[in-house]
Amino acid sequence: MGGAWVKRWSPDGAGHERSLIGALNVHPPQSVNNIKWTLPPSKSHAIRLMALAAQAEQTVTLHGMENAGEDAISMRRCLSQMGIEFENLDADGAVLTQPSNADFLPPEATTAWRIHGVGPKGFTHPVSVLHAGNSGTALRILMALSSRFNRPVMLDGDASLRARPHDAMTETLTELGVSCSFGQLEEGLPLLAEGPWTQTESMTIDVSTSSQPATSWMLASPASPASVNVVYQGSPVSKRHAQLTLRLCREFGAPFGDALPEQFEPWTPRSQHDAITVPKDMSLASFGFLAAKVLNIPVTFDEMPSPEEGLGHEILLERTDVLGFDVKGSTVQSNSEGRHENLDLRDSNDLITPVAAMMALGAGGRIVGAAHAAYKESNRITKTRELLEQFGLKCTAHEDGLEVPGGQQISTPDSLVLTHDDHRLQMTALVLAMGCERQVRIEGDGLHAVADPQAVSRWMDAGVAIESFLYQPE
């Protein structure tokens, strides 16, 4: 029996002193005349392509992987734990030596990842925890991929991912005969899953809050034990992401039609091309747009992805009339000609926070169709409202979005800006800080690296003074 010193741990920190947290101290710039904005590769494309290439019986090279975010690297690390060999290539195609580090971080000169596929049945059982970091996409795909093992697999994520719901995946795993053990209440991870996926006549996939369960099982279907009928439950959201998965699977030879497949059967992925270029992440262009609005300067992107690869985020370019921007080539400039209208983010809810800030500084508007933003790293509907209020910007939360009055001005927060372990809140706060009169302290000094490792260094290169520091949360 434990002594009097034994204490119960709780995820809300009750009863113990919480650890020091990293934060940023941002000194608003005296002047920035223009800024160059480099977009990282799309993690949505990269994570899906890695899952398919790993199950192919060939070698596939992903180009355009410089400045890849932690989400993509988490997926790469976990696939490496399952026996997939990755090689790092520089701009000349030379193989770089993999540095010795626990996170499998590629060398700085890496521009491409070469993946040696092992086929649908070639994965090896991981001997350690598959830690997906902050990536819900990677975690759920790994949950489905792990269903093929007849031995237990432990899956986990960071504090933010632990607090997010995973019921749609665990319920489907259980339906397929996979034994699942996981936490309750505040944290549903780590998850212990023991397969294999057993033969069954049908399976049900809930797509009402996320397209990721559909994505996960499409990507795991090469190792399905037999044909299985698929029933989709709920009204689909983030349909562009599900369509991306469907398209990539078909490009790798999946026996799917134009709609979400109603049947899974075993198949072997094979890419039509040994080299694939990963497009830039259009969702992250939103922070460049916001910077143009906050500082009233032109922002020039190194490369703007095509609308076909925008995954719904091309709405930034399609509705410049509402948001108040002029776009010439890859350069964005704010104007005063926006309109107060509804903006439907059903297929682009990742934009809710920076777009709400753009509306507040522009003509205002109403964000609709974003109810599923409540299931992200934070409840992005309520947390966006709280974040904007810290900068003196008002908006009203409603069931599926926000009502944002226009013509507002930024004021300097009086206290630490809370970001709730959400990188898109942190990156929005970082840009809004550029429009403040005094220094701003922002919670989470490394959150941006999940998606955009250059989010802080980009501003520092433009002459903005930014320092990291530690603080004690209450």
Image (cartoon, rainbow, N blue to C red):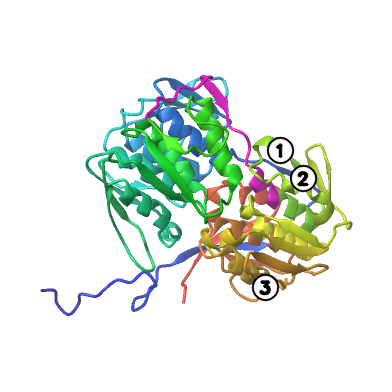
Q: How many marks?
A: 3
Callout 2 environment at 10 Å: few (<14), some (14 to 19), or many (20+)?
Answer: some
Pick whichever of labels 3 and 2 is earlier in the sequence.
2
Q: Secondary structure beneath disc 3?
A: helix
Residue drawn where x is 40% and y is 26% of the image: 267
Callout 1 secondary element: helix
Is residue 100 among what the camera can see? no
**Left or right of 331: which side holds 116?**
left
Could you tell which of marks 3 and 1 lies nearer the N-terminus? 1
Furthest-right residue in view? Answer: 337
Q: Are marks 2 and 1 in contact (CB under 8 Å)?
A: yes
- Pinpoint residue 351: horizontal percent, then vertical percent: 65, 54
On whether residue 275 falls in the magenta region, the answer is: yes
What is the x, y in percent for residue 456? 61, 52
Mark earlier in primary sequence (2, 1): 1
Is residue 451 in view? Answer: yes
- Residue 330: x and y, percent? 78, 38
According to the picture, the residue beneath numbered tag 2 turns out to be 317
Reading the image, the residue beneath label 1 is: 307
Q: Residues within 10 Å of mark 3 (few under 14, many from 20)?
A: some
Residue placed under numbered mark 3 in the picture: 389
Q: Which residues are magenta?
A: 266-287
Q: Is residue 8 above or below residue 400?
A: below
For this view, does 175 lie left or right of residue 97?
Answer: left
Give the CA distance from mark 3 to mark 2. 27 Å
Q: Please name which of the two marks, 3 or 2, marks the residue nearer to the observer.
A: 2
Q: How far, Cα to Cα, is label 3 from label 1?
A: 32 Å
Foreground: 420 or 455? 420
| Vertical placement of residue 15 versus 426, above or below | below
